[in-house]
Every structure is written in C-alpha cells, then in structure tokens.
Amino acid sequence: DDYLSKPFEMMELLARIDDWADHHGPRGGDPVLWMNGTDHLMPQAALGRLVADLFELTRLESEEAAPQLECFAHAELAQDVVQRFALDAAQRGVRVQAVCADEADAGVQASADIGMVERVLVNLIDNALRHTPADGTIDVVCGVERDDAGHPRRATLAVTDSGKGIAPHDLPGIFDRY
C-alpha cells in the first residue's frame, strides 16, 4: 500500500508501530529497541520521536491542519523556545540565544499559527543542536521586514548556527519528499 498518499491509513500504521514498541520494548535498563529482523538498534525515545513526527506530517498533509491565526510577539515565542533547549545546549557546550536584529523589532506582533511556528522553531533548533560542535553557537534572530514608510510588513525568524552546514551536493534535494 502507498501509506503516504492515505493519511488515515498512515496514522493507523504509525499507531501499530507505537503500540508494538510499547509492548515489545525493554522493561527498565537500557532503553534500546531491537528492530525486528535486522542488526540495527534504535533508541526507543528516537523511535517515539520518529513516530510522533510522522503522525504530525500525516496530520499536516491532511485537511485537518488548517492554520489557526492569532497575534503574538514573535520575539517572545523565540525566547520561550530557546529556553527549552538551554540546559541541553549548555551540557553540550553550545550557546543558544534569541536575539532581535533591531531593538524596535522585539515588540512586533506576528499573525500566524503560533503552534505551527513553534513546531518549526523546535525542529530547526533541535537539528542545529545535533549538528553544532561544542563551543558553537545557535542564534534565533527575530527581525521585521518594513515597507517604504518604515512600517512593519512581515515578522521574520531565522535560525543560524556554527555547524558544518549542508553539503552543497545535498542542497538541491533537501525539500524533496523522502
């Protein structure tokens, strides 16, 4: 079956994987799950995140995921998300911070689905943290695009890091599906 084109069947498959992991995973001790029929190990937490991410992707690609627009301070959201990663980053020797390109940008309100924006930030910072070496930096830069009269037109967020980046030969396919 082509589960990727049938969101509800994909969700059922993922629920079965999640259920199987719950019933066949380790009971205490090292949280590692043997993948049936292979020599590969996958940490049970990583499998859980993978299943959750696939559930989210399936939900987003279905008609259920209509954005719920609301106004919020994008700099505050960035700071809140950065704080979630502060301890993990410190333990890895990585500096993570939210900064505004201009002080005037800090209070600008964005109109977007705050949950979806938060999810994107979490994914980008998590990825940056995995690929940034010790003594590296991760910055979430809050900015504002302004019109010719200087009025805010669009709130922007950018995640930058001092990791090695994506290999040039991989760049053309990074947004390809699977």
Image (cartoon, helix red, strand yellow):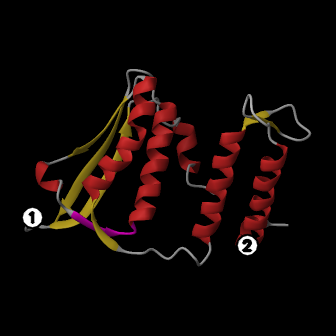
Rendering quarter of residue 28: top right
The residue that disc 1 covers is 150
Question: Residue at 54% of width from left, 73% of height from top?
Answer: 65
Decide: is 33 above or below 114: above
Mark 2 neighbour density, 10 Å: few (under 14) some (14–19) many (20 or more): some
Question: Residue at 12% of width from left, 67% of height from top?
Answer: 151
Magenta part of the chain: 109-113
Q: Nearer the viewer, mark 2 or mark 1?
A: 2
Question: Residue at 26% of width from left, 51% of height from top?
Answer: 142
Query: Of helix, strand and loop, which mostly describes the magenta segment?
Result: strand
Query: Closest to the observer: 54 or 148?
Result: 54
Answer with left or right where residue 38 lies relative to residue 17: right
SS under mark 2: helix
Question: Residue at 46% of width from left, 34% of height from top?
Answer: 129
The residue that disc 2 covers is 8
Is 155 one of the magenta-colored residues?
no
Decide: is 105 above or below 32: below
Q: Percent position (x, y) of residue 83?
A: 35, 42
Mark 1 neighbour density, 10 Å: few (under 14) some (14–19) many (20 or more): few
Sequence-first disc among 2 and 1: 2
Q: Percent position (x, y) of residue 125?
A: 44, 43
Marks 2/1 in contact by CB < 8 Å: the verdict is no
